[in-house]
Image (cartoon, grey):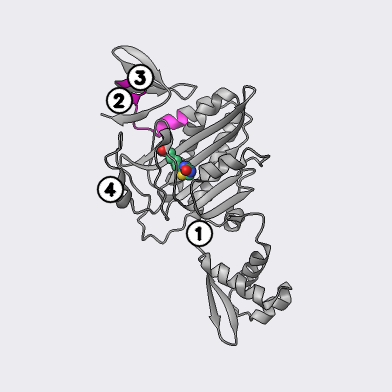
Amino acid sequence: MLTSFDNTGLLKVLNFLKTHESEYLSGQDLSDVLKISRVAVWKHIKKIRSLGYKIESKQKRGYKFVNTTDKLLPWEISKKLKTNFIGKRIYYFDEIDSTQNFALNISSQSIENGTIVLAEKQVNGIGRLNRKWHSPKGGIWFSVIILPEFEISDTTIIPIASSLALCITIERIYGVSSKVKWPNDITINGKKLAGMLVDATIQANKIEKIVLGIGINFKVDVSKIDKKIKNTQNYYGITSLLSPQSKMKQIELFTEFLLELEKVIQDLTNGKKQKIIKKWSQYTDIFDKQISIKTKKGKITGIATKIDLDGGLIIKTNGNNKKIFVGDVIIE
Ligand code: BTN
């Protein structure tokens, strides 16, 4: 595990190499300037390379920083992040069972608002309704712990607000039009690009903590996942934002999304639910369409008309309006 608040020796070496980008620095120089042993310097360089940074080495001359990493490392995120509270504390894993589980565990202790848990790969990723969430390398898999200052009833707007934030960010950075699909999917050309999951702990009728889990197929080989899950119920196809071969890095999408997420959370805190729902409605393609939803009580078919202030979806069915809170929307 790497965090945004330790690894000082490693960061000393990395930052020194970065700030002397065009020069070779010998192990002895690094050891003298940074006041760490030569063995420690060597160990740090080895670790820095294993984290995906390109460090050149030449005999008798030493080490030179060549290129940064593709990985979403905590200190790289911290450097770029413009938020006020989201991401001030970051836990990073090469591999984990589920960031959601880890975040839920640490959220039972006293924890800083906006803490993030992220992983390059999850081996037991969790999707909505307890489904498996395939999370290979190339995706962005993370959970954000939020200590909400808004009303308990507004928790149901969180998935609406965060999926809206992701659509806006994707449009701004890549010029790609993605859609929100109730309750919290993001789609491109009708296929699923990203999903969100909300877990809330409630005490004395007050939401204590919300853990928002987000999975984005950034540059994922979705054909492999498609083969595995195409026969699952309500599956409607899966897509990736970029091809697995793309050289684009994840960091811009990640940091810009967190900034947008913070804005919608502020809106929610300031009681601007209506604004969020209005904006969300501009990004969805389910309204005025014939849809069906499988709920625990059976299948409901009708025309999707709007989202209510509590996040429920209103469906017109046989002349009556029905409000649904949980389920998967299938466009007929
Ligand atoms: C969905 O079913 O659409 C929600 C998927 C949420 C997946 C994310 S990936 C990061 C976080 N950790 C998990 O185990 N799940 C969420």
Q: Look at label 2 and name its amino acid.
A: Ser
For label 2, the SS is strand
Q: Say left or right for 162 vs 224.
A: right
Residue position for label 3: 297
Q: Is residue 302 above or below residue 266?
A: above
Residue position for label 1: 71
Quick one: label 1, few (<14), some, or many (20+) residues within 10 Å?
many
Q: Is residue 177 above or below residue 71?
A: above
Residue 221: x and y, percent?
Answer: 34, 54
Q: Look at label 1 and name its amino acid.
A: Lys
Residue 90: x and y, percent?
Answer: 60, 50
* Camera-nearest label, 3 or 2: 3
For label 1, the SS is loop
Q: What is the quadrant of the N terminus in the image?
A: bottom right
Question: Is residue 284 in the magenta section?
Answer: yes
Quick one: label 4, few (<14), some, or many (20+) residues within 10 Å?
few
Q: From mark 2 to mark 1, how far is it between C-alphas? A: 40 Å
**Can you tell which mark lies on residue 308?**
none
Residue 119: x and y, percent?
Answer: 50, 52
Identify the mark nearer the N-term, 3 or 2.
2
Identify the mark nearer the N-term, 2 or 4.
4
Q: From mark 1 to mark 3, how far is it between C-alphas? A: 44 Å
**Can you tell which mark lies on residue 227?**
4
Q: Look at label 4 and name its amino acid.
A: Lys
Q: Look at label 3 and name its amino acid.
A: Lys
